[in-house]
Amino acid sequence: MTEGVSRYVGRIIAVGRTPLGDLVSAYRVSSRSFPNRDAERSGNAIRIVPRANSADAASESPYIAYESLLWTERYVVASNGTQTRPIFERLRAGHTVRDALIGVLSGLDREFDAHDTPRICSVLDLANDTAYLGSITAEALSVTPVHIAPGQATYITTYGSPLAAADRVDPHFTARTAEDACQHVVGGSIFAHLDSPVCSAALHAGKSGLEAAVFNIRDDA
């Protein structure tokens, strides 16, 4: 991406490692059509919800409210839609990461909106210290284990870059906490040049346990 050039890529999922090597999962909502949304935590879940009394709250779209992040001590699932919960439940039922992602994504298919919006997701398998990216578009289904060096992140987006690729790397992932990661995918490094951020959510798996955070753009107003 050319420095200083803004681009709209829709929703973003990133998986990375802190400079110390801890795994991090992050999700960012970027939206032109539905900008009045927040990330809210409830227990071991983070949901994307319309802001009360906003235009988005009156929308009949089935795609603007959903669980974006779910986790246990073993698995962390992030996604841009209703696929989050069924992927999570299949993992808890004993499916492999590959089978859970393929089964749910192929069953739901992409979002049937005006843009054929891809479904994108990630899974962290904390017991095996591994990360996966998954996506389904109108043309392709992809499930990819990704290898991430400390201080780097890899990412996919709903528009432009929905499939995992070796060159889609942020080499300056400096986040050390979940809060850092929320801020990073909104305004840090390469993400700072991507248009229309609305909110973000992240989970950091450190030696002292799991830490989750949310960031809503209006909080910074």
Image (cartoon, grey):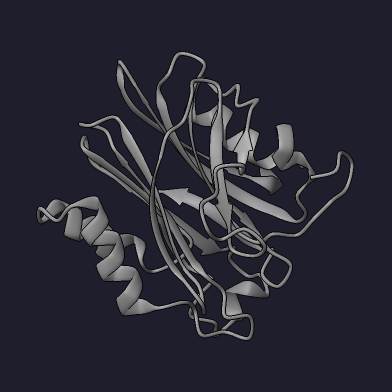
Q: Quadrant of residue 212?
A: top left
Residue 182 point in image, percent of width and height: 57, 37
Q: Is residue 41 left or right of residue 151?
A: left
Residue 177 point in image, percent of width and height: 49, 23
Q: Is residue 143 left or right of residue 57?
A: left
Residue 119 point in image, percent of width and height: 47, 67
Q: Is residue 109 left or right of residue 37?
A: left
Residue extending farthest to the left is: 94
| Quadrant showing the N terminus | top right
Kindly identify the residue that appears in the image at 26 percent across and 55 percent down: 98
Q: Is residue 67 above or below residue 213?
A: below
| Quadrant showing the C terminus | top right
Q: Nearer the viewer, residue 77 or 220?
A: 77
Kindly identify the residue that appears in the image at 45 percent across and 63 percent down: 135
Q: Is residue 129 above or below residue 59?
A: above
Kindly identify the residue that appears in the image at 22 percent across and 60 percent down: 99
Q: Nearer the viewer, residue 116 or 29?
A: 116
Q: Nearer the viewer, residue 159 or 24?
A: 159
Kindly identify the residue that appears in the image at 77 percent across and 54 percent down: 195
Q: Quadrant of residue 185?
A: top right
Q: Quadrant of residue 151?
A: top right
- Is residue 94 something that shows in the picture? yes
Q: Is residue 83 above or below residue 16?
A: below
Residue 80 point in image, percent of width and height: 48, 61
- Is residue 45 something that shows in the picture? no
Residue extending farthest to the right is: 4
